[in-house]
Image (cartoon, helix red, strand yellow):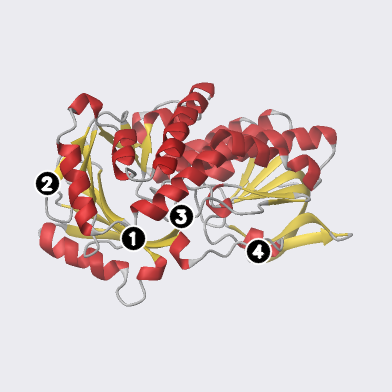
Amino acid sequence: MIKDRYDVVIIGAGPAGSVAGRFAAEKGASVLIMERDREAGIPVRCAEGVSVNGIKPFIEFDKKWVAATIDAACLHSPDGEKAFMYNNGKGLVLERRIFDTELCHLAVNAGAELLMKANATGLEYTGGKISGVHFRHQGENKTIKCSLVIGADGVESRVGRWAGMKTALNLDDLDTCVQYTVSGYKGEQNVCHFYFGLDVSPGGYIWIFPKSKGVANIGIGISGHLAEVKGPKEYLDEFMDKEYPEVQTNYIVYGGVPTAWGLEKYIDDNIMLVGDAARQVNPMTGGGIVQAMIAARLAGQVAAAAVEKGDFSYSFLKQYKKDWDVKLGSIQKTMYSMKEKFMRMDDGRFNKLVQICQNIPREEFSLKRLFMESMKGDPKLMAELARAFVVSKINLKKN
């Protein structure tokens, strides 16, 4: 039975919301996680790729939520050349519906409560401060009181806007994306592919993530400011007609991915945002699952500390931002600078980059090496990038 009041109410039961709820509940906070859909993980608006090392601190490996194991990435240049990258750690393609449900189970086992089909409609205020959440559930309008709201409601986050936060993104900091899940795919089951080029995916890339035998996610993300004349679906359809005319599409998803380095403000009295809602996504790749879970753990820990102390002011909650900046925030800024340069390369530069990568020995070809090669000619950014990789390795070990 859902109570009338909780210490913390979390809006959104994706990886960010469930992990935040778990870590807050583990420390004794009373937590309610609200989800507007009938279950976690739907709709799947995600390429579903993650690194093993990235998710290891948060969940015990289980084959039931793994669709494929990735050993290599293949980079395709505009002129048709390709280079394979093997030395970047093992990756996974998830079954997000199952994975997200398992994260929710962990939160519930830690003491959090979960309410499905609960659509948040606004924030309750008392004395000018947030004091609860309005929502609609089973045909009725309801309100739950709380001391702290955590918005984990994705890129479209209404929670941030309700709290008066500036969540709008410039079009060049928002990728517009389309993805097909297809049957009849005959590529390698352990290799993901990335296609670059102004005629293929301007300001972004096309990806292929294999899943079960014969099934793959094939999608595209292009920078929003370049999508006015020709949209991502047109680019993706042209690619499919050329490269994979034999496959059958059985699932289509559309969405936006934030590629900013973060929101200027995602914390205030009695409220915090986490994950896509706070723009905590790798600006370079658009990947956000691991970033969301890392941020959510920090937010959950600070939320529990706020409950223990009885202090939900901005001055106390800003510890979450400090922790995030130490963990990944500064790296996000470096990745944003890289995105600004990398995604604006012309086709000639992409062709040359893949040619260089073809000559790198297999045991030396890593994501770091790729990025370093792409940033040649910009010593300052190369130095920032090298530092970012060192810091990221240190922080992963601390997980």
Mark 1 vs mark 2: give the one in front.
1
Q: Look at label 3 and name its amino acid.
A: Thr
Image depth: mark 4 or mark 2 in front:
4
Callout 1 touching callout 2 (CB < 8 Å): no
Amino acid type of the residue that numbered disc 2 sits on in the rendered structure: Lys
SS class, disc 3: loop
Q: Residue at x 77, y 49 (%)?
A: 270
Q: Which mark is residue 386?
A: none
x then y, percent, for residue 96: 40, 44
> Dot 4 corresponds to which residue?
161
Say what secondary structure mark 2 lies in.
loop
For the residue labelled by badge 1, is the local secondary structure a helix, a strand or a loop? loop
Q: CA distance from mark 3 to mark 4?
A: 19 Å
Q: Amino acid at mark 4?
A: Arg
Q: Earlier in the sequence, mark 3 or mark 4?
A: 4
Circle 2 residue? 186
